[in-house]
Image (spheres, rainbow, N blue to C red):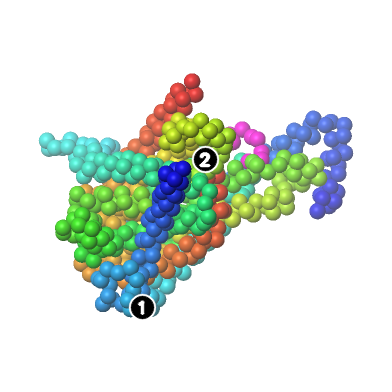
């Protein structure tokens, strides 16, 4: 009995050690970025797990750069617009795909799935042409347009699965009352779809906030860039003297909102991610 | 709300009293019409940003278009892909850097997705156990997924810094290595650095999908296995793994498609070094930096075809495997 108890204790210790290991592995790079960002530049190259001298110089330095502030502003505008457009087009499309049986429905669903698997590079030159033709090159509006390629299919896909789960009776009652499809969407489904829309909106927001390839290719000047590009190019100067302190400070600034979102909405995010994949 | 609408529709309702089936078809027709109307904005948007650009990319790959003047493009047939001139082969298919980038991409995809699946399943199994503070651990595990790829690449680039990075510092402290390693600059290690960052970032995705599948498993067969005193590892391989295979397949295909088009991590961590260059990095370099839209489009088209082929092959094999498993 004694050995069995011991084995049980050992098992528990091993289990908790594994949990601690996972926690450290997941959080440490972010934690270390925070530590680095709080160090004065003279301490930067001393490896330590806790800054011996606290100092906000790195934050002051990035926030005094107008290009970084512009990048944050651009990212916010782009991400919110992308979410708005994706939800607007997504909710009507998902009504059509989730509630109405019509010919060509499965073809449309297949096309949407196909687009969501697109490699972005495959459309790069064609999209470049479209953006130039619309006079949107080096303009955040061009990014808003191009981001629909990955946010829209995903939004439609997830909203459709949610739409399908709503009970048939609701819609039957609305049809009996003679409601048009538009009224059915806005008055019957929209109030019920808020949770699903919050989930997909959140995921679309994160995707748009993090996007890099299009943002790098379709913008040219500092004033039009989004945050990921700004951070990637902070290191652009010389290969030997990278401004690690400001890079880490900028990284923390961009990541903190996302970390807060994840902690608050983790349930929603998990349900959205799995709805997009498992039921697909 | 309903009264006013009822009033509008009263005649139709009255007519339907006598010809009921026709009213049904009218409503149906109206609904189908509305469905297409609702789909139209989305379809137009997708045509504009996906369909048309893809067609144009295919087209441009057969031209000598350059970025500075896209309009002045001449059709040159397959020259961007492969052409024999003056006793030498030219074109993407004859470029050793392209083949290097294909190999890099495949290597990166296979290794990182395999690692992600193994670690993702382990993390999911742990998160599936009941313990205090599970919500906190799950939130912590999600953090790497939410961090922008660019930012995670920078964070790791700093930790992997050859002179001042904490990883070299710790490895030297432990006596694993004698001299600092130039993780991102050294051709031997740079691919592993890229894989390390990608695995870190995407374990959460795999873990969450597997966790969702684990939570849907029936509890009773586990109780039966426990009563019978079967070793947990045996239970995992004989019961759990087959049951979560469909979810795992979905996770693998999502991750594989993502990995095959990898760009951000590699671009930030090792820029245009050929030892880690992926197909996407190669295509973008030709397109934007060398301004050779025709050649770059040819590379993009090949990338598209490779991914499409991989998808079809995977779906085909997956279906076969599931059928075999079902027998």
Which residue of the protein is positioned furthest toward the front in this rendering? A2
- The verdict on residue A99 being magenta is yes
Q: Disc 1: which chain?
A: A
Residue closest to the eye, A228 or B189: B189
Instruction: Please say whether residue B85 is visible from this viewpoint.
Output: yes
Q: Residues within 10 Å of mark 2 (few under 14, many from 20)?
A: many
Question: To which residue does mark 2 refer?
Answer: B213
Q: Residue at x 24, y 38 (%)?
A: B93
Q: Position of residue A157 (x, y in %)?
A: 55, 44
Q: Could you say which disc has been placed on residue B51 in the image?
A: none
Question: Is residue B169 within the magenta segment?
Answer: no
Q: Secondary structure at mark 2?
A: helix
User: Above or below — where is A216 with respect to B315?
Assistant: below
Q: Badge 2 sits on which subunit?
A: B
Q: Nearer the viewer, residue A213 or A270?
A: A270
**Cα distance in 3D space between marks 1 and 2:** 45 Å
Residue B176's place in the image compared with B109, above or below, is: below
Residue at 51 percent across and 46 percent down: it is B129
**Number of marks in the image?**
2
Residue at 53%, 48% (x, y): give it: B130
Res B58 visible: no
Mark carried by residue A54: 1
Residue B185 placement (x, y as % from top left): 20, 56
Q: Based on the displayed image, in which of its 4 quarters is residue B253 positioned?
A: top left
Alpha-carbon neighbours of circle 1 within 10 Å: few (<14), some, or many (≥20)? few
Q: Main secondary structure of the magenta part?
A: loop
Q: Which residues are magenta?
A: A98-105
Q: Is residue A258 left or right of residue A247?
A: right
Nearer to us in this view, B107 or B274: B107
Seen at 52% across and 60% down, the residue is: A263
- Counting from the top left corner in percent of width and height, residue A205 is at 50, 58
């Amino acid at each position: 009995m004694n050995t069995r108890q011991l084995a049980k204790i050992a098992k528990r210790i091993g289990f908790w050690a594994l949990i601690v290991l996972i926690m450290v592995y997941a959080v440490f790079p972010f934690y270390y970025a925070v530590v680095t960002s709080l160090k004065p530049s003279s301490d930067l190259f001393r490896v330590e797990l806790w800054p011996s001298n606290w100092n906000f110089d790195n934050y002051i330095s990035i926030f005094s750069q107008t290009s970084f502030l512009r990048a944050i502003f651009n990212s916010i505008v782009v991400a919110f617009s992308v979410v708005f457009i994706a939800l607007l087009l997504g909710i009507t499309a998902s009504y059509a795909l989730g509630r109405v049986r019509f010919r060509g429905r499965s073809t449309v669903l297949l096309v949407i799935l196909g687009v969501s698997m697109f490699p972005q590079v495959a459309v790069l030159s064609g999209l470049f042409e479209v953006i130039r033709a619309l006079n949107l090159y080096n303009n955040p509006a061009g990014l808003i347009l191009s981001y629909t390629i990955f946010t829209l299919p995903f939004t439609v896909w997830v909203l459709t699965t949610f739409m399908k789960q709503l009970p048939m009776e609701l819609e039957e009652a609305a049809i009996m009352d003679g409601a048009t499809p538009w009224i059915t969407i806005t008055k019957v489904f929209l109030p019920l779809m808020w949770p699903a829309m919050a989930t997909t909106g959140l995921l679309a927001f994160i995707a748009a906030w993090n996007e890099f390839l299009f943002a790098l290719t379709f913008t040219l000047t500092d004033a039009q860039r989004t945050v990921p590009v700004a951070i990637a190019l902070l290191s652009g100067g010389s290969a030997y003297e990278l401004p690690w302190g400001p890079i880490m400070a900028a990284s923390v600034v961009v990541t903190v909102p996302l970390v807060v979102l994840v902690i608050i909405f983790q349930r929603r995010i998990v349900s959205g991610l799995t709805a997009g994949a498992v039921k697909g | 709300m309903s009264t006013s609408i009822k009033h509008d529709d009263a005649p139709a309702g009255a007519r339907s009293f006598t010809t009921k089936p026709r009213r049904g078809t009218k409503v149906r027709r109206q609904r189908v019409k509305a469905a297409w109307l609702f789909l139209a904005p989305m379809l137009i948007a997708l045509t504009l940003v996906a369909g048309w650009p893809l067609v144009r990319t295919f087209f441009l790959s057969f031209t000598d278009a350059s970025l500075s003047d896209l309009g002045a493009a001449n059709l040159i047939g397959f020259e961007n892909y492969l052409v024999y001139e003056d006793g030498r082969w030219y074109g993407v298919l004859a470029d050793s850097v392209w083949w290097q980038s294909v190999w890099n991409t495949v290597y990166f995809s296979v290794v990182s997705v395999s690692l992600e699946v193994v670690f993702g399943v382990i993390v999911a199994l742990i998160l599936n156990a009941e313990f205090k503070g599970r919500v906190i651990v799950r939130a912590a595990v999600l953090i790497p997924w939410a961090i922008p790829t660019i930012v995670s690449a920078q964070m790791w680039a700093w930790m992997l810094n050859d002179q001042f990075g904490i990883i070299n510092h710790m490895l030297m402290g432990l006596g694993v290595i004698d001299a600092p390693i130039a993780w991102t600059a050294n051709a031997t290690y740079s691919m592993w650095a890229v894989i390390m960052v990608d695995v870190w970032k995407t374990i959460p995705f795999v873990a969450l999908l597997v966790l969702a599948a684990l939570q849907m498993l029936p509890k009773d067969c586990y109780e039966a296995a426990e009563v019978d005193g079967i070793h947990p590892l045996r239970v995992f391989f004989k019961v759990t793994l087959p049951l979560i295979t469909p979810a795992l397949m979905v996770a693998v295909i999502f991750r594989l498609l993502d990995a095959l088009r990898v760009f951000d991590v590699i671009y930030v961590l090792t820029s245009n070094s050929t030892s880690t260059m992926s197909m996407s990095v190669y295509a973008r370099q030709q397109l934007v930096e060398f301004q050779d839209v025709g050649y770059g489009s040819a590379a993009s088209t090949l990338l598209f075809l490779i991914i499409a082929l991989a998808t079809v092959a995977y779906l085909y094999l997956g279906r076969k495997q599931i059928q075999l498993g079902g027998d």
